Amino acid sequence: MLDRFLRAWLGSWPSSGGLVVVGSPMREKPRWDGGEQRALGVTDAGGNGVLSVPPSSRDAVAALVAATAPRVLEAALGEHLPALVGRPEQRCFTGVFRWSEAPVAMEPAGEWEPSHGPGIPDWLRPFPGEVLVAREPGTGEYLAGVGLKPHDPTGVEISVGTEERARGRGLARRLVTRAARRIVDAGAVPIYLHDPANTASAHVADASGFPDPGWRIHALAGTA
């Protein structure tokens, strides 16, 4: 299932060895939220993977990768990749890439609500369809939520956030496992991405059945 998703998302998978650069029309199409993703890559623990860029940028990016030693490749991509794909104002970042084949079974939390409904925080509103929301019993005050990024019918990314006053209750992991189960039941693979420095997010992923196999996500983002 993961291989099928990565082939659809990146345009090619698996790698034939090292970081393989592919030109994919997907990098010229809007992503799930209408924005763009001009460069996107996934690498395994050995540094083997696929970096997907627009077809017009493929040769230049491939030349950079071929001319750069693996130990300094991440730094070279950070310095040169945005300009090579026509977005010099953006930055290249590397995050932890996790997925789950067996979400942990635990007491579910939250209810599925329309993302445009009342009392939904601004960060959850861009997600299409429903979001999973935990509220304070009795008052209905928002505590935590999950939004789903439908990158492809075969792969859906989970985003979770908890209000500071509600942390320490285990809400995030219970929301994530409930969302992951919905994704699995729909025949897709649940994906969980986070900054390597975000230890709280890493703990949620570990507790929810998303182990860290040493894989990484490489992508562009705005500087704001």
Image (spheres, rainbow, N blue to C red):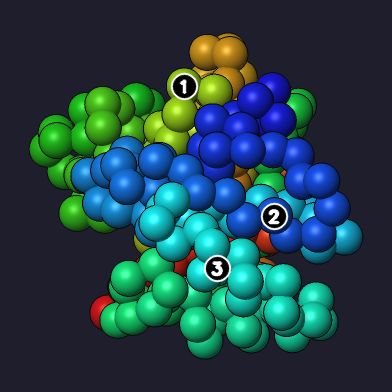
Give left or right: position of 115 versus 77.
left
Residue 111's mark? Answer: none
| Residue position for label 3 | 61
Q: Is residue 202 left or right of residue 57?
A: right
Q: Vertical placement of 223 versus 101: above or below?
A: below
Name the residue: 30% across, 42% down: 29
Amino acid type, label 3: Val
- Residue 153: numbered disc: 1
Q: Element type at marker 2?
A: strand
Circle 2 Cα neighbour tier, 10 Å, few/some/many (<14 / 14–19 / ≥20): many
Does label 1 or label 2 sit earlier along the sequence?
2
Label 1 neighbourhood size at 10 Å, few (<14), some (14-19), many (20+)? few
Q: Position of residue 164 (x, y in %)?
A: 42, 67
Q: Quadrant of residue 69?
A: bottom right
- Which tag is nearer the camera, tag 1 or tag 2? 2
Q: Which mark is residue 20?
A: 2
**Residue 174 is at least partly visible in this image:** no
CA–CA distance in space, label 3 to label 1:
28 Å
Residue positioned 58% across, 13% down in the render: 187
Report the residue at 61% width, 65% height from top. Answer: 62
The C terminus sits in image quarter: bottom left
At label 2, the amino acid type is: Val
Q: CA distance from mark 1 to mark 2?
A: 24 Å
Name the secondary structure under disc 3: helix
Q: Amino acid at mark 1?
A: Pro
